[in-house]
Each structure stands twice: as structure tokens, then as C-alpha cells.
């Protein structure tokens, strides 16, 4: 029986403290238990991270009490949290926070124990309801709302009907409803009917993939399968059957999808197969809903979790399978400490808990692809679309020639306009894609070349037509549009709107096709919770002819009636100061192209570009991932970039540039001698985004064959290095964004 517990406390400290376990708690406390401990003069909450044999200190105090009975974090997930902290050089406490949603962690998180109202049989008796309507219209109104599925809880229901709870109690007396005290899990899909779907008979390529995954679930050889299947090849059906297989062995499963494709459409596909056995962990859910879904898993009532990044830490025992869909997605990387990559941590959780891991994608990350080449992961290929539907035909349009034809830069090529026209005439749907929101990127003076730039962030401001303002997409600053060029020596009134954004495309398309119904979808329109669902819903049922959007519409969506996808400016992602720009462009174009021709009519993709011969654009136009990968890997190998090395990016920021520069230099001077010969050390330099939110940013880039060669010494130095008060240092291991 353990005597001591090592505890991480709820206030951000990168330290663990030992406590004595009081007699009364001895057989209850386990790794993962939430406890209250004395801390200085007060009491704080914390988590038990280990049960050590002995402590380095002798003046230990006792744990005050335990919160809840069953540990909130399993030993396995706790071990994973510690691994994350170590690998990503982050405080243990932030890792513990990461594995447990705040809605579960917080003190006042409780099941919604309220009175809830259930309609009885007579509520569907039309005659009785009509009588009620004549005699007590208020009670009838309550019944209407209840039956529409909008409200179930007594207080909420009464409020929605604009009446008091007495009216509801009146209904109960008349036998129309029953008021019950039972705790009920809030169902995020309440009011929606989900039809159960059956297994499809797998096609041969799916059968092969399924067999490999089954083998992995049974024997862990191979431990990880990369499922590389073109868009529409039936990957989701393979996931569904693999999960079903794991469930039949009594094992649980996790499906990770990128936040961006965690649409009701995706969730429904899983829900319709697994019903209540699946819990959804979604950032759009309210804290209460998340809390309930999490506890359905924790109690074992549901054994499958689906969600974005953090669903990886779902409390599921005896895991059989983790699926990471769209494994190449950068949103799997968390932007704050611990800066973990959910795909890589999924592989780690699989390894620790002895469960199979499937990474699925149409455009594998070069990291995962490289791992199949080196034999670390097994590869399952699905090169054909279901029913052997053709891959879309991709046409690359050289916009330089278009400009030469008319004497000025065009937004739409003649070919694209013609193609849209023909689809509209046939009542087919069109997606126009632009990797940028807003109206135009930047405001450029045609005379002196002045670019309106955020004074705090050193990035161009974005012009938003509807609100007539300039916005910074980094810090969110809003500025009015200047009447004249702000350059003192120029003051030209003809400030030109250069570049294009989704709003501008929308206006131009509306002009060209006045009869078409057009919808725009980007981060600006979808800040409201339901906008995303509504816009996609309208598009799916054919209300909308043309959907214009950013990468939000690039992925995962399945619209059989879309026969044309136009990419307005394929170059945008190409000109970023990042060695992954080519890979990103390739992925984006391939994913967008995958939206075309998913029904009976084959699709066409028109890619407009100013650099038609760039290798990424060429490879994308042939939908040739392997050709692209061969070429790109050669370049990465030569320059010792990932996947041939691990990249650690250290960023230091502060308001006073001299101070930032001085401290990062001092840090480098101590760090570099601690690192081995084989670590490639980049000298401190201003970050590509040299200023954000009024802070100067400097970076050090380190590359090494093994992460530990860097993080070991780095953590040791971080523990003792004293940064000036106003200077902050962040560490990004396996950095994805180099801005
Ligand atoms: P992916 O996830 O690879 O993009 P999906 O799983 O979405 O592909 O499959 C595309 C379409 O084909 C879906 O409508 C799906 O229901 C259908 N489908 C998948 N597998 C089969 C199958 N074996 N038989 C018939 N239809 C299938
Ligand atoms: Zn800014």
C-alpha cells in the first residue's frame, strides 16, 4: 500500500510535490486521482502523478482529501502526459491540463441534475391536444415546444414557452407529460434522428486495408498502418469496420478528425453506425455537454470517442484502435504549450497501451510517408475511388498569359468563367476556393508602394469591404481605412486594393452570374455557431449554386453534385518563408480537387496560377503524391530538414528589441556548447513574423537526428536560465509553423 503521493498542483508550476497519504485514503488514492492538498497557507487542487517509494524531503504534509472516487485520469493517460511534458519540453502541469478537459477539471462541473419533462402518449393524441389548445393555450404552447424537441428541462421549457413551471405541472396533472428527477446526459444531437447504417461490402482495396488493420489490432504487428487512399476511396468505411472489429473484441476506440472537418456530416456517419456507443468531444459543445460526453466514456457507458485533437486523451480503458483521419493536417499540432502533435502522440499512446493506430489520408505527411519507407509503419494503399469513379481532371491555367491577353491582372480566366457557366446551365454545383479570407490582402499605394501594415505585428492589414475597415489577422486590431496614402511624402488619394480575398471573389462572381445563388464560407462568416452547419446544409440540398470559401471547404466534405472546383490563386500558399510551403500547396490543391466529381458526373478542377511550372503545382495537377514525395524528400534530405531531422524552434519575445536580442544571444551562448556536434545550430535571428502584438520576436532553429539530443540539455538550461522579467521564451519541438 502506497504511503506517498507525488502531486502536480493546479497552479502553473513546473514541479511535483510529495505528500503523505492519510490512513483513510490509502486504498483509494491512485495515479490520476484528483486531490486537495495543503500548499503554503492555503489548500489547492492537484493530481496524483505517481506513488513514489520515498521522498527527498522529510517535512511532508498530508493530503487533505480526495475529489471523486475513480481517478479522473487513468495511469496510462497520466504516463502519456508525462511523456508529452518531457518530449515537448513543457511543464508537467500543462500536460496534465491538456489531457483533462477544463469542464471536467473544474470544481463546479456537475451533471445537469434538473427536473426534466417527458411527453406521454396523450401528447400525440390530436383530439386531446386540440381540446387543450382551446381551454389552456399556455399549456398547449408548452407542449408544442416540448414536442419540437427544443427544450426538455422544466425551467428551460417554461421559459421558452414564455410561462411558468406551474403551466407544465398543470400538463402533468392532465397526463400529457411526466416530470422526472433523474439526471440526464445532455445529448448534443437531441432532436435529430440518426438512421442506423449497415456495413457496406468492402471493395478489394478496402478488404486488403481492413485485413492489415485487423492484423494490427490482433497482434500489433504492424503497430501503425498508414492508410493512403485517394479522396473518395472509401477510407471512412474502412475505419467504421475496423472500429466495429475492435468493439467485437471488447476493446474501445478513438477517432481523431481535424477540427475543421468535425462537421455534423462526419459525426453522423459514425453515429449512425455506433449509436450511443460513441461520444463526441467537440469544441463547439458547451462546457456542460462536454462534461457529460466525457463522463459517458469515463463510466464506460460509451466506448468510442470521436473528436478533434484533445479527444486523443479520452478516458477509454482497454483501447483497441486509434484512428487519425487526415493525418497530414497541421491543426493536429497544438499552438500553445505543450506544443504536441496529436498524430505523433497517438502513435505514442498506441505504443504505451498496446493498441493499433491507423493514420489515414489522401496526402500523407512526408513524416509518415518516410516512416513507411523505413519500415516503421505499414502501408495500405487505396488508389481507386469507390465504384471506380474517375479522378477529376485537373487543368492548370497560366494567369500570366491571361494578363497578357487583356493587359491587366484578372481574377478569373476565360476558361474558369466558361466552365462555371456550363455547370450552372446544367444545374450542377461549383466550389470556388481561395486560401485567404477578407476582401483583399492588403492596401497598397499604386504610386509609392506603401503597404498598410499592422503597427504591432509587421504583417499587412486586411481590407474588409462590408465593415469598411482594416484588420490584423494576428492580433485582431481594427483600423479605419485611410483616405489618402499614409506616407507623408505621397498622400495619394488613389489607394488601390491589391490582392484578392473571398469577399472580393463573392462580389465579382455575383456580378458575372447574377442569377446564381452564392454563399461564402470563411472564418469571418462562421464565427456564429450554426453558420457553418447552415451554409453547408443549404449547399447540400442544392439551395446554393456556388460556394466560395477558404480552406474550411477544402476538406472532408462530400457533395455528389459538385462537378467543378476552381482554385482562384494557387500560388498564395507557395510564397511563405517556410520549407514546407511546397508540401502545403500540394496538399491543399489535392484536397480541394478531391471535392469535385464525387457523384455520377466526373469532376473538373481548374487551377489558376502565376507559377504553372512549380513542381508542387505540377504534381498536384497530376494528383501524383508519390512523384511529389520522391522529389521533395530528396530536397529535405539534402538540407537535413524533417523528416530527416527533428526541428526545435526557440522563440523569444518582448517589447524591447535590444533586450530580446541580448537575452536570446546569451541563451544561445550557454546552450550551444551543451548540444552535441551533430546538432545543427541556427544563430539567433528575427522571426519571419518579426513583430506581433507589439512584441519583437527572435528565433533559434535547431535540427538534430534525435529530439532528445536537443531537449535534454534545453530543459536543463531552461530550468536555471533567468530571463529578464518582460521577455518570454517558448519552445516548439517538431515545429510546424516557422513564422
Ligand atoms: P474517403 O473517406 O476515402 O474520402 P468515403 O469513405 O467518404 O471515402 O467514401 C466515399 C463514398 O463511397 C461514400 O459515400 C461511401 O458511403 C461510399 N462507399 C465507401 N465504401 C463503399 C463500399 N464498399 N461500397 C459502396 N459504397 C461505398
Ligand atoms: Zn496586429
Image (cartoon, rainbow, N blue to C red):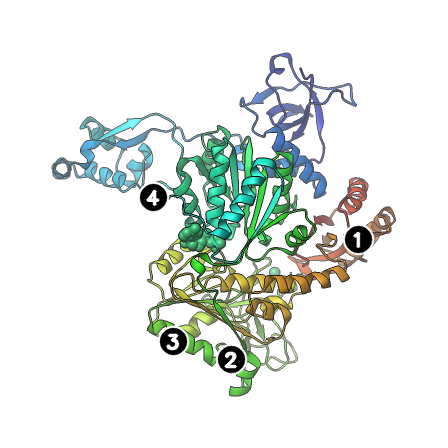
For discs 3 and 4, the disc positioned in front in the rendered view: 4
| Sequence order check, earlier mark of 4 and 2 | 4
Helix, strand or loop at mark 2: loop
Q: Position of residue 341 (x, y in %)?
A: 63, 47
Answer yes or no: disc 1 within 8 Å of ligand 2: no
| Sequence order check, earlier mark of 2 and 3 | 2
Q: Which residue is disc 2 drawn over?
A: 410
Q: Position of residue 677 (x, y in %)?
A: 87, 51
Q: Is 236 situated above or below 431? A: above
Left or right: residue 157 compared with residue 653: left
For discs 2 and 1, the disc positioned in front in the rendered view: 2
CA gap, disc 1 and disc 3: 57 Å
| Sequence order check, earlier mark of 2 and 1 | 2
| Sequence order check, earlier mark of 3 and 4 | 4
CA gap, disc 2 and disc 3: 17 Å
Q: Which residue is disc 1 drawn over?
A: 664
CA gap, disc 4 and disc 2: 47 Å
Crowding near the residue tagged with mark 2, few <14, some 14–19, many ≥20 C-alpha atoms within 10 Å: some
CA gap, disc 3 and disc 4: 37 Å
Mark drawn on residue 421: 3
Helix, strand or loop at mark 3: helix
Left or right: residue 422 compared with residue 454: left
The N terminus lies in which quarter of the figure?
A: top right
Q: Quadrant of residue 564?
A: bottom left
Q: Is 685 situated above or below 222? A: below
Give the residue furthest to the front.
204
**CB within 8 Å, label 4 to label 1:** no
Amino acid at each position: 500500500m502506497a504511503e506517498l503521493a507525488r502531486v502536480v498542483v493546479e497552479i502553473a508550476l513546473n514541479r511535483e510535490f510529495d505528500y503523505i497519504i492519510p490512513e483513510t485514503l490509502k486504498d483509494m488514492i491512485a495515479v490520476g486521482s484528483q486531490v486537495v492538498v495543503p500548499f503554503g497557507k492555503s489548500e489547492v487542487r492537484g493530481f496524483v502523478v505517481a506513488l513514489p517509494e520515498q521522498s527527498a524531503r522529510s517535512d511532508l504534509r498530508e493530503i487533505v482529501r480526495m475529489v471523486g472516487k475513480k481517478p479522473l485520469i487513468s495511469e496510462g493517460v497520466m504516463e502519456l502526459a508525462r511523456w508529452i511534458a518531457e518530449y515537448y519540453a513543457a511543464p508537467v502541469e500543462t500536460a496534465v491540463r491538456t489531457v483533462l478537459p477544463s469542464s471536467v477539471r473544474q470544481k463546479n462541473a456537475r451533471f445537469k441534475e434538473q427536473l426534466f419533462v417527458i411527453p406521454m402518449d396523450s401528447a400525440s393524441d390530436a383530439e386531446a391536444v386540440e381540446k387543450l389548445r382551446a381551454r389552456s393555450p399556455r399549456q398547449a404552447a408548452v407542449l408544442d415546444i416540448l414536442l419540437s424537441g427544443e427544450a426538455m428541462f422544466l425551467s428551460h421549457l417554461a421559459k421558452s414557452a414564455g410561462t411558468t413551471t406551474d403551466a407544465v405541472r398543470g400538463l402533468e396533472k392532465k397526463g400529457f407529460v411526466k416530470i422526472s428527477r433523474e439526471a440526464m446526459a445532455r445529448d448534443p444531437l437531441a432532436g435529430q434522428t440518426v438512421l442506423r447504417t449497415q456495413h457496406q461490402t468492402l471493395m478489394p482495396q478496402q478488404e486488403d486495408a481492413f485485413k492489415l488493420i485487423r492484423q494490427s489490432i490482433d497482434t500489433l504487428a504492424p503497430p501503425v498502418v498508414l492508410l493512403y487512399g485517394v479522396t473518395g476511396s472509401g477510407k471512412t468505411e474502412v475505419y467504421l469496420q475496423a472500429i466495429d472489429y475492435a468493439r467485437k473484441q471488447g476493446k474501445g476506440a478513438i477517432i481523431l478528425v481535424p477540427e475543421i472537418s468535425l462537421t455534423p456530416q462526419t459525426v453522423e456517419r459514425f453515429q449512425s453506425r455506433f449509436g450511443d456507443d460513441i461520444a463526441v468531444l467537440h469544441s463547439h459543445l458547451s462546457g456542460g455537454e462536454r462534461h457529460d460526453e466525457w463522463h459517458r466514456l469515463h463510466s464506460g457507458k460509451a466506448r468510442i470517442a470521436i473528436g478533434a485533437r484533445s479527444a486523443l486523451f479520452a478516458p477509454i480503458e482497454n483501447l483497441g484502435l486509434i484512428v487519425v483521419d487526415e493525418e497530414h493536417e497541421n491543426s493536429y499540432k497544438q499552438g500553445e504549450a505543450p506544443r504536441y502533435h496529436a498524430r505523433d502522440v497517438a502513435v505514442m499512446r498506441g505504443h504505451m497501451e498496446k493498441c493499433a493506430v491507423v493514420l489515414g489520408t489522401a496526402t500523407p505527411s512526408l513524416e509518415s510517408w518516410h516512416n513507411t519507407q523505413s519500415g516503421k509503419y505499414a502501408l495500405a494503399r487505396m488508389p481507386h475511388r469507390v465504384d471506380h469513379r474517375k479522378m477529376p481532371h485537373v487543368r492548370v491555367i497560366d494567369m500570366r498569359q491571361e494578363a497578357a491577353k487583356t493587359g491587366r491582372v484578372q481574377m478569373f480566366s476565360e476558361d474558369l468563367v466558361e466552365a462555371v457557366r456550363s455547370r450552372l446551365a446544367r444545374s450542377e454545383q461549383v466550389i470556388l476556393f481561395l486560401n485567404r479570407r477578407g476582401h483583399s490582402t492588403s492596401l497598397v499605394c499604386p504610386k509609392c508602394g506603401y503597404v498598410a501594415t499592422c503597427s504591432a505585428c509587421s504583417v499587412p492589414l486586411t481590407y474588409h469591404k462590408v465593415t469598411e475597415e482594416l484588420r490584423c489577422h494576428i492580433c485582431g486590431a481594427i483600423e479605419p481605412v485611410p483616405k489618402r496614402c499614409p506616407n507623408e511624402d505621397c498622400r495619394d488619394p488613389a489607394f488601390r486594393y491589391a490582392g484578392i480575398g473571398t469577399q472580393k471573389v463573392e462580389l465579382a462572381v455575383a456580378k458575372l452570374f447574377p442569377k446564381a445563388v452564392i454563399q461564402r464560407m470563411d472564418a469571418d462568416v462562421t464565427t456564429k455557431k450554426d453558420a457553418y452547419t447552415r451554409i453547408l446544409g443549404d449547399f447540400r440540398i442544392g439551395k446554393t449554386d456556388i460556394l466560395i470559401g477558404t480552406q474550411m471547404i477544402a476538406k472532408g466534405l462530400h457533395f455528389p453534385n459538385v462537378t467543378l472546383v476552381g482554385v482562384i490563386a494557387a500560388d498564395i500558399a507557395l510564397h511563405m518563408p517556410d520549407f514546407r510551403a511546397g508540401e502545403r500547396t500540394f496538399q491543399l490543391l489535392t484536397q480541394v480537387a478531391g471535392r469535385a466529381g464525387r457523384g455520377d458526373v466526373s469532376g473538373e478542377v481548374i487551377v489558376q496560377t502565376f507559377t504553372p511550372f512549380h513542381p508542387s503545382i505540377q504534381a498536384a495537377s497530376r494528383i501524383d503524391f508519390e512523384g511529389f514525395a520522391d522529389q521533395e524528400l530528396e530536397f529535405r534530405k539534402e538540407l537535413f530538414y524533417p523528416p530527416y531531422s527533428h526541428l526545435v524552434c526557440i522563440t523569444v519575445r518582448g517589447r524591447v528589441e535590444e533586450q530580446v536580442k541580448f537575452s536570446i544571444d546569451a541563451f544561445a551562448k550557454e546552450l550551444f556548447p551543451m548540444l552535441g556536434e551533430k546538432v545543427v545550430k541556427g544563430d539567433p535571428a528575427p522571426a519571419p513574423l518579426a513583430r506581433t502584438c507589439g512584441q519583437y520576436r527572435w528565433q533559434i532553429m535547431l535540427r538534430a537526428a534525435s529530439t532528445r539530443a536537443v531537449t535534454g540539455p534545453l530543459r536543463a538550461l531552461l530550468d536555471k536560465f533567468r530571463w529578464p522579467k518582460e521577455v518570454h521564451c517558448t519552445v516548439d519541438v517538431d515545429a510546424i509553423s516557422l513564422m
